[in-house]
Image (spheres, rainbow, N blue to C red):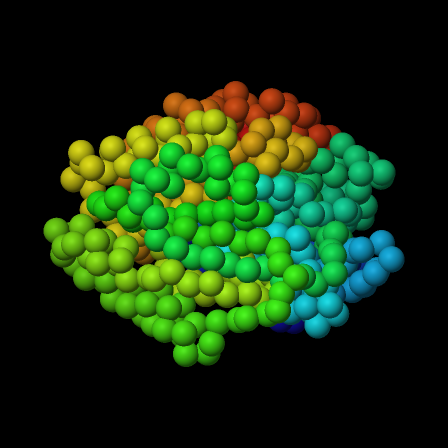
Amino acid sequence: MSGKSGTAPGTEWRNWAGTVTARPARTAAPASVAELARTVTRAAEDGLRVKAVGTGHSFTAAAATDGVLIRPERMAGVRRIDREAGTVTVGAGTPLWQLNESLAAAGLSLANMGDIMRQTAAGAVGTGTHGTGRDSASVAAQLTELEMIIADGSLLRCSEREHPDVFAAARTGLGALGVVTSLTFAVEPLFLLTAHEAPMSFDRVTGAFDQLVAENDHFEFYWFPHTGNCNTKRNNRTSGPAAPLGRAGAWYEDEFLSNGVFQLACSVGRAVPAAVPRIARIASRALSARTYTDIPYKIFTSPRRVRFTEMEYAVPREAGMAALREVKALVDRSDFRIGFPVEVRAAPADDITLSTASGRDSVYIAVHLYRGTPYQGYFSAVERIMTAHGGRPHWGKLHTRDAAYLAGVYPRFGEFTALRDRLDPGRLFGNPYLRRVLGD
């Protein structure tokens, strides 16, 4: 980097899954709000669009640009912990793993989180990253305040009390409203969760899904295509004592089986698709039941070293299991060979304008394929099932929906686009992905 603003000629940027490549005109890594404001203002003067990237964990081109690519790593770290208010304020580029470790060291925790923590805080919030939960799921729903640089170069602070209309939209802002500089999350005293993982048949888990969600703080399961087998995970708060996984057991299941052996199985399946159903049957029986108790981020998150492509849809809670059964019927009758489990989670309704759970209790159904495996046929077939149930695609995962469709499944869609028109009338923060999903 060179210059006071940390600006340099653009270099090629690629996302984690390898599905998106961008060649920006220049790249900037501002270290302060003032530097970021100057970067945004200069880009506007030069007729260049602006996009901020995180760690590239979105599968879509949500952050891609041929203009100015802003890297957030110099605007990272915990800025303030307010124990009385129960909040933590972090820089937009703070990786979630750093946030979680810092909170744990301070005896604090988020209420919920997703299953990986390599994303930046702003990236996770802006694309609607979520976990699973009866009472909470979305990372963005835990925000109490957000600051961002908007198109005119000014700093806009929003919360439920200050610019509440902006706050409702910017919590899942897709990078369309401005460049986030800091986020304030609600936190609580550090607590313990007991995780119970156990196999369960597809018919049993789908038949009892509503009960399992109601009876557990956090419930999710994975269905192994080409089988009738699932692996379930129930996370519940406990008074302890802590009983974490032993080092050897954690390595065997989370690294050796879930990453090492799974990587090999995926490679074999890609090379010899006919072997996938047999591999799936073996894999679905490889993980045995286990119970362990630890601090939240060590329960919620897992290492994900096998690279993949993913599509995920949120459907109304009442349609969730019907949609999943249709996916199973699709796989059973088709020539698709699916070596990756299908992940199923739940979320309560929230009040965020373009949250996938906005205004309705939701079930998330995520389908994956090993990176390099042709995914279009399988994903398209699953997408037809999801859209028939009024599904909403995850903003950071592969899908083909456009503004016309999305306006029909988001009652507040027009509210978001009207706010965008007001904050960014010249589309300084636009790109082709946003043009497709939001219109122009």
Q: Is residue 9 visible?
A: no
Query: For the C terminus, which image quadrant?
Result: top right
Q: Residue furthest right?
A: 84
Q: Is residue 29 left or right of residue 331?
A: right
Residue 190: quadrant of the picture: bottom right
Query: Foreground: 243 or 98?
Result: 243
Residue at (74, 52) in percent of width and height: 186
Q: Is residue 394 above or below residue 242?
A: above
Q: Position of residue 248 (x, y in %)?
A: 41, 78
Q: Is residue 224 visible?
A: yes
Residue at (53, 54) in percent of width and height: 235
Q: Position of residue 253 (x, y in %)?
A: 37, 68
Q: Residue furthest bottom?
A: 248
Residue at (57, 53) in percent of width and height: 236
Q: Position of residue 433 (x, y in %)?
A: 50, 39
Q: Position of residue 79 (x, y in %)?
A: 78, 64
Q: Is residue 278 left or right of residue 224?
A: left
Q: Is residue 202 left or right of residue 137?
A: left
The tally of labels here is 0
Query: For the N terminus, which image quadrant?
Result: bottom right
Query: Foreground: 115 or 26?
Result: 115
Residue at (43, 72) in percent of width and height: 250
Residue 411: quadrant of the picture: top right
